[in-house]
């Protein structure tokens, strides 16, 4: 599967306190808090919250992965089944709190909230995904469970700002 490759990226102010990340290669844009950083790591678009202090062990983040489904076409329900199964096979415990239907960028979308113990760190995630044009778009907010509510309003606004530019 191919992950997000970002080219010709422009970042500029949208409104007070928010910036826009514009990916012209994938024809998408997202808004993020100006106190967060935006960039790519190993082909994944990632927005990171500021560290609270030097002792902060986990940087809350929202990331976007675009998976190429050309070699294994899946619809939304099939992709959902595969995603849930992959979580269950991960090392550590995973507890799904909810999975519901919604719309994002005009696409039928699944939204899940889950908790997981990942190598000794208790995490809470909110994830949205949809399938369009033989690609799966996964947007995930990941936080230390104790910090989830602190960053969730900003993360949700960021996630919901996902739009296609063409």
Image (cartoon, grey):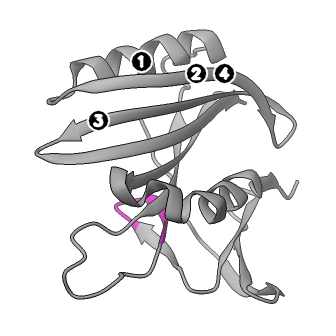
How far apart in space, not on screen, are marks 2 and 3 (Cα)?
Answer: 15 Å
Does 142 appear above or below 23?
A: above
How far apart in space, not on screen, are marks 2 and 1 (Cα)?
Answer: 10 Å
N-term-proximal mark, 2 vs 3: 2
Residue of label 1? 84
Say if mark 2 contacts mark 1, CB within 8 Å: yes
What residue is drawn where x is 61% and y is 37%?
128
How many numbered tags mark residues here? 4
Q: Is residue 134 left or right of residue 85?
A: right
Q: Give the mark toward the camera: 2 or 1.
A: 2
Q: Is residue 38 left or right of residue 125?
A: right
Q: Give the mark toward the camera: 1 or 3.
A: 3
Where, by quadrant of the figure, is residue 102 drawn?
top right
Q: Which mark is residue 116?
A: 3
Q: Is residue 94 left or right of residue 141?
A: left
Residue of label 4? 100
Residue of label 2? 99
How far apart in space, not on screen, are marks 4 and 1 (Cα)?
Answer: 13 Å
Which quarter of the figure is the C terminus placed in? Answer: bottom right
Q: Position of residue 19 (x, y in %)?
A: 72, 82
Neighbor class of circle 2 (other Cα within 10 Å; few <14, some 14-19, many 20+) is: some
Which quarter of the figure is the N terminus placed in? Answer: top left
Q: Secondary structure at mark 2?
A: strand
N-term-proximal mark, 4 vs 3: 4
Neighbor class of circle 4 (other Cα within 10 Å; few <14, some 14-19, many 20+) is: few
N-term-proximal mark, 2 vs 1: 1
How far apart in space, not on screen, are marks 1 and 3 (Cα)?
Answer: 13 Å
């Amino acid at each position: 599967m191919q992950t997000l490759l970002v080219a010709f990226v422009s970042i500029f102010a949208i409104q007070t306190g928010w910036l826009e990340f514009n990916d012209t290669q994938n024809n998408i844009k997202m808004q993020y808090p100006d106190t967060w950083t935006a960039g790519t790591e190993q082909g994944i678009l990632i927005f990171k919250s500021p560290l609270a202090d030097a002792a902060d062990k986990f940087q809350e983040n929202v990331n976007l992965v675009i998976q190429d489904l050309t070699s294994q076409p899946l619809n939304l329900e099939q992709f959902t089944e595969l995603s849930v199964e992959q979580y269950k096979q991960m090392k550590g415990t995973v507890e799904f709190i909810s999975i519901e239907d919604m719309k994002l960028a005009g696409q039928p979308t699944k939204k899940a909230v889950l908790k997981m113990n990942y190598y000794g760190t208790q995490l809470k995630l909110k994830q949205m995904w949809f399938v369009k044009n033989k690609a799966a778009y996964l947007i995930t907010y990941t936080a230390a469970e104790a910090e989830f509510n602190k960053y969730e309003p900003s993360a949700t606004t960021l996630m919901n700002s996902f739009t296609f530019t063409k």
